[in-house]
Image (spheres, coloured by chain):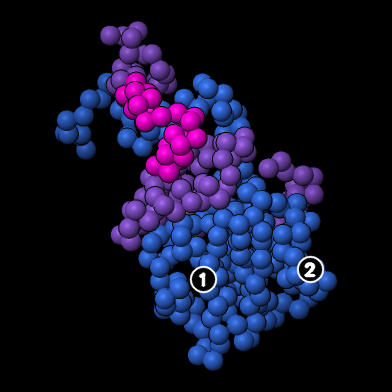
Amino acid sequence: MAHDHDHDHDHSELPEMDLRVRALESLLVEKGYVDPKALDIIVDTYENKVGPQNGAHVVAKAWSDPDYKKWLLEDGSEAIMSLGYSGRQGEHMEVVENTDQVHNMVVCTLCSCYPWSVLGLPPVWYKSAPYRSRAVIDPRGVLSEFGVTVADDKEVRVWDSTAEMRYLVLPQRPAGTDNWSEEQLAALVTRDSMIGTGLALSPDEVSS
Amino acid sequence: MSASDSEKAALDAIPSIPRNTEGPVFAEPWQAQAFAMTVALYDAGRFTWPEWADMLSDELRQAGAGQTGEDYYHHWLAALERLSSDKGLTDEAELEDRRRAWDRAARATPHGSPIVLGAETATE
């Protein structure tokens, strides 16, 4: 299929956002405010090294080790840092536990504060205005859109993150995983289950 | 964030979770660059994280409720430009000049070649 639109194919044209980023970056680099090598490292870290697997490790350890779980719920920041995951914004981490009586979900109504050190970068829907506004007004409706049904007699708690305070949901451990290792358990912990818009996977869902 | 040995060991021990349903972390490379610049400036002490969060939430509030996650990084970049100006790191006129310079450079660069500032003076 031939291109028949009126593009100049001999020369490059950069999109507007690309131009603005290049403008800002080249100025900041020239003036010595940022080091281009540091930028590469940050991008690489958040794209590849930091991600929900960090949070899954935290959750799997809490499921396996009652002492660690107790510590995690009392002082989330310290307990998470003990596994080598530290928040770069110095924010406080609070871990909220799902139980038979309570389901927790996390939102940032102002912008999109998110526990980056354990979950990586936030998904698009987390940053969208509909999620940010509706999670507080109609949490059960939002949850049902994510395929999560919460029984009427179960309380839903919505946690609104801030620059200083980030929340991580400790999902309920799935049934049928009694003798599982931490490594096996971590494979059941999804990103959404740690935001509260999902549940941990059941053993059937990973073996198939 | 330097990965400690314990972190590396921890990551090695955990099988990565299937990520096919989670989509790309950044939709386009410029978003990753804007994100990284923000973190680098914060690391260098050019602003505090609450200052950044205030600026970003202000941008998002002005954008209103119609915005979607897709244009989130547009607001992110606008907030970063404003905060950089507020902190005296750059200013609007300088940014606009430089944006035009990159635009000229891009248009003067043949497809497939890296775009460098000043390319337009060499060919025009």
Residue type at mark 1 is: Thr
Which residue is under mark 2?
Answer: A71
Q: Amino acid under label 2?
A: Trp
- The picture quadrant where one finds residue A208 is bottom right
Residue A108 visible, this orientation: yes
Is B69 placed above or below A33 here?
below
Q: Which residue is more in the foreground, A143 or A177?
A: A143
Looking at the image, can residue B13 be seen?
Answer: no
Q: CA distance from mark 2 to mark 1?
A: 24 Å
Q: At which x and y percent is residue A178? A: 76, 78
Measured along the vertical axis of the image, is residue B107 above or below residue A97? above
Q: Give the vertical position of B53 relative to A198 (above or below).
A: above
Residue A153: % across, % down: 54, 92
Mark 2–mark 1 contact, CB under 8 Å? Answer: no
Rendered location of residue A125, percent (x, y): 43, 61
Q: Horizontal and vertical percent for residue B6? A: 80, 49
Q: Colour of chain A?
A: blue
Residue extent of the magenta highlight: B77-101
* Quarter the C terminus of chain B occupies: top left
- Does the segment drawn in magenta span residue B87? yes
Q: Nearer the viewer, residue A172 or B71?
A: B71
Asked which secondary structure carries label 1, the reply is loop
> Is disc 2 surrounded by few (<14), some (14 to 19) or many (20+) residues within 10 Å?
some
Which one is in front in this view, the residue at disc 2 or the one at disc 1?
2
Number of the label disc, if any, that sits on residue A197 = 1
Which quarter of the image is occupied by the N terminus of chain B? Answer: top right
Q: Nearer the viewer, residue A192 or B15?
A: A192
